[in-house]
Image (cartoon, rainbow, N blue to C red):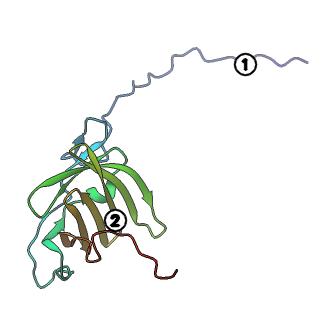
């Protein structure tokens, strides 16, 4: 026996409101802006600080030049993505802009990003590792390299001592055995 057809109630359905478009919240705070290549231009991640009794790190060791105490500002270093540019203030008052080229998440939860600064057409390496409590960084320039070390958001940026060239100015080794 064939099934009888089901009757549909012809009364109109209640109207469904039209969806409203809402602006998408940006992942980065408003002081950051898009750079020309589409990445975010991250503002200076640190500023000069005063050393007090609660400062977590001792002044860097002998031979370093221009040690500058700093305090991290926000989480820009830990949020950097490929294509972003990060403004890096140096102890001499100058600033460099690093472009992020690679980002890796480490096993312990630390985040490492690598990048480059371009100076007079040449590229110099930049490398930052950002953890929950500590940050370490390396900034290469034609005049030498700089290091960044922080603990609990405070620490130092300084120029590294020049390499020891006390053995004749070359890095070649002379064999001692015939």
Outermost bottom residue? 53
Pair 2/1: label in front: 2
**Which mark, residue 42?**
none
Horizontally, residue 123 falls left or right of residue 72, namely right
Relative to 129, residue 133 above or below: below
Q: Nearer the viewer, residue 106 or 126?
A: 126
Q: Circle 2 sits on which residue?
A: 130
Which element carries disc 1, helix, strand or loop? loop
Instruction: Pick the residue in front: 131 or 121.
Output: 121
For image coordinates 20% across by 82% down, the residue present is 61
Distance Cα–Cα, label 2 vs label 1: 66 Å
Q: Residue furthest top?
A: 10
Which residue is nearer to you in this view: 46 or 54?
46
- Nearest the camera: 162 or 165? 165
The residue to which callout 1 is attached is 6
- Which of disc 1 and disc 2 is earlier in sequence? 1
């Amino acid at each position: 026996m064939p099934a009888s057809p089901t009757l549909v109630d012809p009364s109109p359905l209640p109207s469904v409101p039209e969806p409203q478009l809402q602006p998408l919240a940006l992942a980065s705070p408003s002081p950051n802006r898009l750079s020309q290549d589409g990445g975010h231009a991250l503002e200076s991640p640190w500023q000069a600080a005063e050393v007090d009794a609660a400062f977590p790190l001792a002044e860097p060791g002998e031979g370093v030049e221009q040690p500058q105490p700093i305090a991290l500002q926000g989480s820009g270093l830990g949020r950097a993505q490929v294509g972003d540019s990060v403004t890096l203030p140096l102890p001499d008052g100058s600033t460099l802009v690093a472009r992020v080229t690679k980002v890796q998440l480490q096993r312990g939860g630390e985040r490492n990003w690598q990048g480059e600064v371009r100076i007079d057409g040449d590229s110099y390496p930049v490398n930052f590792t950002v953890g929950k409590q500590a940050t370490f960084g390396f900034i290469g320039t034609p005049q030498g390299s700089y290091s960044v070390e922080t603990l609990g958001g405070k620490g130092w940026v300084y120029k590294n001592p020049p390499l020891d060239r006390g053995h004749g100015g070359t890095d070649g080794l002379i064999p001692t055995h015939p």
